[in-house]
Image (spheres, coloured by chain):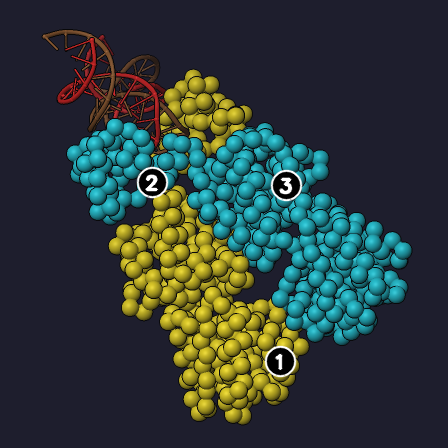
Chain colours: A yellow, B cyan, C brown, D red
Amino acid sequence: MKKVSLKDIAKKAGVSTATVSYVLGNKKCRVSEATKQRIREIAKELNYQPNQIAKSLKSGKTYTIGLIVADISNPFFANLARVIEDEAAKYDYTVIFGSSDESAQKSWKLIQFLQNRQVDGFIIVPTENSEYQIEYLQQQKVPFVLLDRYFPKLSTTNVVINNFEVASTMVNDLMKASQKKIGMIAYKNSLIHMEERIRGFQEASKATEKFIERVNFNAIETEVELALDKLIKNGVDALFFATNSLAVAGLRVLQKNNIKIPQEIALASFDESEAFEFFYSPVSYIQQPIKEMGECAVQLLLNKINTGGTEEKTEKLTAKCVFRKSTQK
Amino acid sequence: MKKVSLKDIAKKAGVSTATVSYVLGNKKCRVSEATKQRIREIAKELNYQPNQIAKSLKSGKTYTIGLIVADISNPFFANLARVIEDEAAKYDYTVIFGSSDESAQKSWKLIQFLQNRQVDGFIIVPTENSEYQIEYLQQQKVPFVLLDRYFPKLSTTNVVINNFEVASTMVNDLMKASQKKIGMIAYKNSLIHMEERIRGFQEASKATEKFIERVNFNAIETEVELALDKLIKNGVDALFFATNSLAVAGLRVLQKNNIKIPQEIALASFDESEAFEFFYSPVSYIQQPIKEMGECAVQLLLNKINTGGTEEKTEKLTAKCVFRKSTQK
DNA sequence: TTGAATTGATTAAACGTTTAACCATCTTTG
DNA sequence: CAAAGATGGTTAAACGTTTAATCAATTCAA
């Protein structure tokens, strides 16, 4: 069954497609009430659905946002996606998404792919070594907002959290439960959010001997196990995880090795996980303001899209520490 | 900066847009090698990116799949989305998604919204009372595949699991740990997957006194607490949860009430959750073949899109029971 | 040496909208 | 009663592609 177009309505109403377009678009124009009525009735009768593709071609606007996250199956990004979806829907925008797996190459493919589909703008969680992609978008004057991370050397609009401050706060608390040495497990990448979390850790633990292990995103399970072995051998009695995935992998190993939490090792982690709540010694964590982050990113992006404004600003939201049993001795 | 179009390349190369289109589209046509070379060079130089919108308008194909799930922030659906994204990308398809929140009204809005955007087909996790939407799509000859659930009265292509069988298997095991009464917590809706899970429960527990409590999707926390109170008062010593969200809410209540698992109450649940693994008494669960489900749905949909085939079939995949401590007495 | 075949392109229409510019017809008004 | 204004539309071009149909120039065969 072919789809109903303006032409079909026009034919049936005995008018031109222009008239139909004016009426159904509620544009101010000189059409008699009777004709308007008739056109509207026929449109309803034929169940007319405007072709957004044609509209987009004409207007150059698709009312679509391209969302690039590291991995949509990670609860942090899934929740972010959900918030962004809802916020975008309020303004009749659709969201197209893709997962970069922290690979600059995949991210580049996604950007090109989505740009061919003429998205009006991007919300991007950028990967390591993707600066050139961001500069490309700037040069092409494509509106975008960076989320979760950004590149300090580039002037862009970003939505991030106070990684340094909140990490310090959390590690300060962790220190109270530590007598000797403290360890951290982070990703092996140079992205700002990771660096800031590490900097916060170092700042808060500067009086203590410390060990930092960094693992690859692609081999969390095996590398976290190795990292933990090392840290344990080094005698740490407190551990800070830079993300939920790292922490969950870590909990698995700690549980396997029968290490008493927090007696032998105290724990804290960034992000949330259902695991944290149900672990026998509930894990202290840093709760990111996901709702605000998503909403803010959409707002800033739509603002850029609609005003064409080039002013860049960084929105730094505040994450919250939730203290549980894992940091109490 | 305006985007580069065929016209720009044509002007620069001194040929018509048609020639450029033929060359860049690798269509068989009569153009000299020299001209081809020149056009390709200019296209590269100008960084030409074809306008997918214009292509879509012409061809009537958008290479886009509309995905409607209950809630993208639920790990089950997030994982499904990830698999679908990857599988679709293999065939150069993009995924647009939306969450229905189990509301037929939202689902209907999403379907219309995505249809205006001319998606080539849908993968839908249908909500209760959305039969008319499915019939509408059939009547409009829009290709679609139903996932996770379907409507037995409608002839559609579906990808589901063996809910009845696997629920029976799991509850059979649960029965071994139960001496008296067994309870189940399910959603208050009439969708087939829920009914089948309940039927499996009833079949396996037919020798035992049993209680089934059903809660609303929109008020899980409060209603699960009420339901559990009832079940505990009724003296159940085994519990089966119909989904991960129900189980997680249940675990919270059980933990709060200091109920010993599995000594006082044995547990099992559908789906997975990180909570299951780290609960002090790891929870037995039913693992759905998410990867196969997503891949299968995409394959069936693309097949429908490309062949225009109208043959409907139901793909019933096999879920797996993972037995843990929560069902051992 | 003429007609046919081949080569290397161009033209124009189409996809479904939007919208500026135009054109009848009727009604006022001086 | 002619010019001006108001009313109710229509025409046509444009957005960026694709593709069937056409055309001009060259080469080939008889």
Compared to A205, does A185 lie above or below? Answer: above
> Where does label 2 land, which residue?
B51
Residues at discs 1 and 2 both on one chain: no
Residues at discs 1 and 3 both on one chain: no
Whole-percent x and y of residue B101?
A: 60, 51
Measure the C-alpha gap from mark 1 to mark 2: 56 Å
**Amino acid residing under circle 2:** Asn
| Nearer the camera: disc 2 or disc 3 | 3
| Nearer the camera: disc 1 or disc 2 | 1
Q: Which element carries disc 3, helix, strand or loop?
A: strand
Chain of the residue under label 2: B
Q: Residues within 10 Å of mark 1 (few under 14, many from 20)?
A: few
Does residue A172 appear left or right of residue B270 in this picture? left
Compared to B238, does B304 lie above or below? Answer: above
- Looking at marks 2 and 3 on the same chain, the residue that comes earlier in the sequence is marked by 2
Q: Residue at x 37, y 60 (%)?
A: A104
> Where does label 1 land, which residue?
A257
Which quadrant of the figure has residue B26?
A: top left
Compared to B295, does C21 lie above or below? Answer: above
**Amino acid residing under circle 3:** Asn
| Residue A27 is at least partly visible in this image | no
In the depicted view, which residue is nearer to us: A161 or A257?
Answer: A257
Chain of the residue under label 1: A
Which quadrant of the figure has residue B105?
A: top right
Does residue B129 appear left or right of residue A314 in this picture? right
Q: Residue at x 55, y 42 (%)?
A: B299
Measure the C-alpha gap from mark 1 to mark 3: 44 Å
> Where does label 3 land, which residue?
B158
